[in-house]
Image (cartoon, helix red, strand yellow):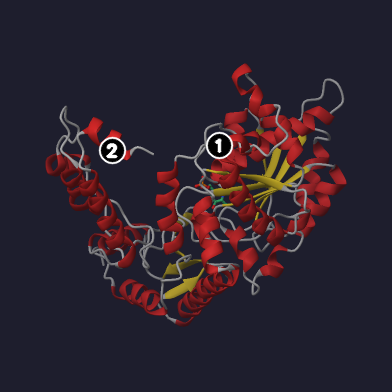
Amino acid sequence: MNASRYQRNQHVDLDALQKAVLDYVHERVVLSPPLDGPLSEEELRSIVGRTITTQGVGPVEAMRVFAEDLAPACLSADHPRYLSFIPCAPSDAAVMFDLVVGASTIYAGSWLEGAGAVYAENEALRWIADLVGMPASAGGVFVPGGTIGNLSALVAARHTARENAPAGVRPNKVAATFGAHSSIKSACEVMDADFVGVATDEHGRMSGEALRAVLAESPGEFFCVVATSGTTNFGIVDNLAVVAQVCREFGVWFHVDGAYGGAGLAAPSVRHLYAGIEECDSFIVDPHKWLFAPYDCCALLYRRPELARAAHTQRAGYLDVLTDAPEWNPADYSVGLSRRARGLPLWFSLVVNGTDAYTAALEQTLEVAAYAEAEVARRPEFELVRGRDLTVIVFRRLGWAAADYHAWSDKVMEEEFAFVVPTTHDGETLARFAIVNPMTTLEDIAGILDSMAAFAPAHA
Ligand SMILES: *Cc1c(COP(=O)(O)O)cnc(C)c1O
């Protein structure tokens, strides 16, 4: 590597560049993250102005602009009191190794170009496949997120169903609960497939009877059933054994969306909730959600990867050297071609910390979630909406209207105390905690509940 060539060409002081970047990283990783918060575009315009100039401003000034003006206008998803959506709490090892991935310029779409990286990514995929209970032949690829993971699995499922369908039959329907993630409907839009909602039982889980009825109504037309192992809004795990059984009866591809909740497979205290998952044809989990990896990272696994390969391999004369090779080319298993070795931060962190540390960190978040649930049940100002499966808690602040939830949430974000936005369910605005950060403490939870209990609505 001839670094000085770049240095000369770009008139950039490499030492200053390194120092500016690494000093910032050191501070960001070592110190507890500030919550920070958004500014309007006008505010950013007036503070930051135009940043790109003909001559460049050099690394020190560019880092100053980011560190002082831009970064503070971004919420830190790893802040311990960031409980909205699904947070992201990467391990130090994973964050640091992300820098190494960036510095290494590895094309990780093919074995030819990225063999060592692909080998390591496949080790991490194997760890996940073993948690699921998939056979030795299982395999897949790390994609940017659950949305692309779900889309890629659905494309493989439809391709397979159409290959096997009688002449003239083109299966085009997907069955999932209405609590399934919005990305399933989005994938159906992209694929011009039909989403068919399946009713849930009294626990919010996909009902086996309802699924059977839906599939029986349109024989041969379904190419996939999507079960969710941890819905985003409530953390509900579908009854996977029942869904697997119905999929077997109808010969339909069984996909499990574990983008958030799939991580719980590594937590012995909740592993029983996933019984039946080992029968899935495909599975996703986002390590950037509850498996302590940085954005953006989704593990996509297939029981029979050759089916996905048949659906996804791109063919072109200049790719023949890759597609004709027998080795594992990650790009053959998803939508997309060029790819960052985005599974490597997870892999490195697993190697550094060992898988027991993952189990311990997951159990830690489950304990904090159990505490949050118990506190909500115990305190008179609150009411649980439903019992928790994993680490999402949804509850009412008694006496609050929708505007109060928003006013409190805005206030604590502006104070940089916490980021806890409300959710809605059946038209009702509700409070919701998603706990995936091992740094979130019982005191953090108690402090947030105290703040909600003390908050006086303006209209009262
Ligand atoms: C977050 C989530 C997704 C989408 O994942 P992205 O990484 O945001 O694309 C899909 N399914 C479930 C259950 C999720 O929680």
Lower position in the chain sequence, tag 1 or tag 2 = 2
Residue 9 visible here: yes
Mark 2 lies on residue? 4
Say left or right for 286 vs 430: right
Q: Quadrant of residue 112?
A: top right
**Badge 2 element:** helix
Mark 1 lies on residue? 186
Q: Check the image and report above or below for 46 versus 200.
A: above
Find the distance from the CA under tag 1 to the CA under tag 2: 47 Å
**Badge 1 element:** helix
**What quarter of the picture does the C terminus occupy?**
bottom left
Q: Quadrant of residue 446?
A: bottom left
In this rendering, the label closer to the viewer, 1 or 2:
2
**In this view of the protein, which residue sits in the foreground, 142 or 122?**
122
In the rendering, at what x and y percent does residue 147 appear?
55, 42
Say left or right for 402 vs 49: right
Q: Check the image and report above or below for 424 versus 168.
A: below
